[in-house]
Every structure is written in C-alpha cells, then in structure tokens.
Amino acid sequence: MSNPLSNTNTSEPNFFEQVYQVTKLIPYGRVTSYGAIARYLGSGQSSRMVGWALNGCHSTEDWIPAHRVVNRFGLLSGKHHFPGSDTMKQLLESEGVKIEDDKVVDFEKLYWDPNIELS
C-alpha cells in the first residue's frame, strides 16, 4: 500500500497535519498510541508532540477522532483535553470499546498500529 500521507502538492503537510491525517485513518472501534503515530511519521521520540497536535485538533475544520489515541498502556491520558471529564470514554464506548478505570479493556486486541496497517 502506498503511503497515505504522500502529497502530490509541492509543499508537504506539517507535522500536526500529518498527525491529523494518520488519526483520521484509525478505524472505528480501534485505538492507537501517541508513540505509534510518532514512529509512523518517522519521529519516534515525538509522542508528546503528537499529543500537542491532538490537543489542538478541535480548532480544525475536519473532525479528527482524537479519542482513539491513548497512551502506550491503553490509558485515556488525553481525557482532560476533551470537554467534560467522561467525553473521551463516552466516545470510545459508543464505538464498542470497553473502558475500565480509564483504561481500554483488551487494549492489545483493539490496538491499531499504523506501521503495520499502513505499510
């Protein structure tokens, strides 16, 4: 499969835009991690920057399913950046993802790795 982030325009998307593009590809009912997105983008040490990008995605024109991105242990570490304390959990549960104690149940089973899925 070709890289879904390749750009036929003369200017490449910036890092935040690339994060948004990958996040849009996470399938309904699946989750990934900040680090997985960073590694896919060739910036393995930039998981925090992925988090910063997703914190700002609410101001974009497109809807970015940022609720599908959790930390490497399956914890809803970004939940405080959503309106309401349970919004992230509610969005995931509406997709059939079970959450207990702010952690994705069956994280390994639901984990979507863009390095594998998009290669």
Image (cartoon, grey):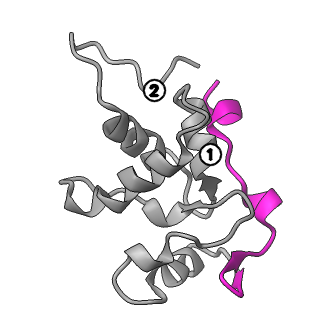
- Residue 24 screen position, x and y as percent: 43, 48
Q: Quadrant of the C terminus?
A: top right
In the displayed structure image, the side of residue 41 where residue 16 appears, left or right: left
Residue 63, labelled with which disc?
A: none
Residue type at mark 1: give it.
Answer: Gly
Disc 2 residue type?
Pro
Residue 87 appears at what percent x and percent y? Answer: 44, 83
Q: Which mark is residue 35?
A: 1
**Could you tell me how far apart the alpha carbons at marks 1 and 2 are, in whole angstroms?**
18 Å
User: Where on the picture, by quarter, is residue 1?
Assistant: top right
Reading the image, the residue beneath label 2 is 4
Relative to 57, is 111 on the left or the right?
right
Res 39 → quadrant:
top right
Task: Say which label, 1 or 2, has the lower sequence index.
Answer: 2
* Crowd rating for badge 2 (residues with CA inside 10 Å; few <14, some 14–19, many 20+): few
Label 1 packing within 10 angstroms: few (<14), some (14-19), many (20+)? many
Mark 2 secondary-structure assignment: loop
